[in-house]
Amino acid sequence: MSAAAPLSALAALLGPRGLITDPADIAPYAEDWRHLYRGHPPAVLRPASTAELAAAVRICAEAGLGIVPQGGNTSMVGGATPSARGDEVVLALSRLNRVRAIDPVDLTLTIEAGATVKAAQDAAAQAGCQLPLSIASEGSATIGGVLSTNAGGNMTLRYGNARDLVLGLEVVLADGRVWEGLRQLRKDNTGYCLRQIFLGAEGTLGIITAAVLKLVPAPRQRAVAFATLPSPEAALSFLTRCQRHDQAALVAFEYMDRHGMALVLQHIPDTQLPLAAAPHYALIEFASARTEAGFTEAVEEMIAQAIAAGEVIDATLAASEAQARAIWRLREEHAEAQKRAGASIKNDVSVPVSRVAEFLREAPAACAAFMPGIRVVAFGHLGDGNIHFNLRPPETMAEAEFLAQDHAVMDAVLGVVRRLGGSFSAEHGVGRLKTYLMPEWRGGVELDLMQALKAAFDPRGLLNAGKIFP
Ligand code: MLT
Ligand code: ZN
């Protein structure tokens, strides 16, 4: 349908700050972070309040105009990019970014969807608390985005995925009605848990405009260590040792292989390895609100035992906040380093934690059998069984030729994932990139139920069309 009529109504509602129609200003909203997709939205809507957003949705709904909600536009799977047909507007949440309340007794933060994850973390810290959610893109990614995609990240091991941190939601529905579900309750057993239906729904069922998030008391001590490891099996044994040491304090167990580390050292300024190079690396963090002495020393002792057992080759504990940051950068810059190195095919997969070493052995072999010379970059949240298993073309192959085979390359990896009882998307979601996998992996009853929910919440299919469903 033509967007001209709703656009003039939207202009009257949102004013000049709230509506972008200049193609040059629209451009950054039209393309995804990985440059896989480019859409042609006739406009970007930037409402300043939930009421304004709801009124804008009503205008779009009346006109049958599609809506693509967008937070920080950091999706790895094209989850927030509009279609190229010009029949969908982008709904940017960036002006809904206020902290509405923070309660250190309830340990909750009520915050609007357009606030960045970093802003939410800072608000929590100011109240002596911590938002236990951390992802590499937290400076740009927004609360609405991470909740809509049920992001995982670096602390899932201890605190769960984004959906585990939500007590309440405010959501604008496809017809412009508002569900005011911003409850602050730790217990509320009153029928279906509606918030969980919107969490991880990738903006296809409603638009999250605010949330009540769970906080924890701010940690008082932290031990961040970087270790070199001889093998994937050693990494798994070391994880088990860390869990037995102090599961309540183990907040991160991250894995990196030598290929990904080499890219970070090559492409990211001011990075250096604190130890001699090795085939495998781990970053571990223990954190606690307890104050008793000996916390770090106990971690040191546990690592010494891991070295004696042959699980760890060598390790270093950060002696300052700056050193901890430097160690974390080696892990968090992996995605950026890979982007700078050129094209890659990303697999965000999970397997049961107990099978992660098998995966790290078998998936590279399966890929090499399919395409000799293919270059593997494996890293990620080993403590959750979630590996980012990314592939680069053989030295001699052109990027375009490589990318044209993305499904076949992914199939080689996913064959191993399936055999080990895993998932084709652990934390990045389905977006647009992986819709084709849904019938095979989630078909039958599961996809039927998802489609029934979609029909109930968004019968005309106006919200983030083309995502999740094939
Ligand atoms: C990460 O954990 O760094 C991200 O999920 C990024 C990626 O998969 O490349
Ligand atoms: Zn990740």
Image (spheres, rainbow, N blue to C red):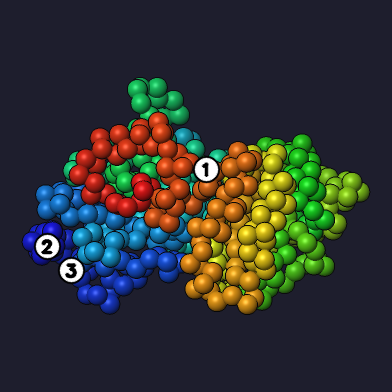
Mark closer to the observer (2, 1): 2
Is the Cβ of the residue at disc 2 closer than 8 Å to that at disc 3?
no
Q: Secondary structure at mark 2?
A: loop
Mark closer to the observer (2, 3): 2
Q: Secondary structure at mark 1?
A: loop
Mark 1 vs mark 3, CA separation in Å: 37 Å
Residue labelled with disc 1: 161
Residue labelled with disc 2: 2
* Point 63% across, 64% down: residue: 371
Pointer 2 or 3: first along the chain = 2
Q: Nearer the viewer, residue 197 or 468?
A: 468
Quadrant of the frame with the N terminus: bottom left
Amino acid type shown at disc 3: Pro
Amino acid type shown at disc 1: Asn
Dot label at residue 16? 3
Dot label at residue 344? none
Q: Quadrant of residue 376?
A: bottom right
Q: Nearer the viewer, residue 416 or 284?
A: 416
| Horizontal side of residue 253 vs 52, given as left or right | right
Pointer 1 or 3: first along the chain = 3
| Horizontal side of residue 58 vs 27, given as left or right | left
Farthest residue toward the top?
Answer: 190
Residue 237, given in percent of the width and then of the height, sits at 79, 43
Mark 2 vs mark 1, CA separation in Å: 40 Å
Q: Nearer the viewer, residue 278 or 273?
A: 278
Residue 196, given in percent of the width and then of the height, sits at 40, 35
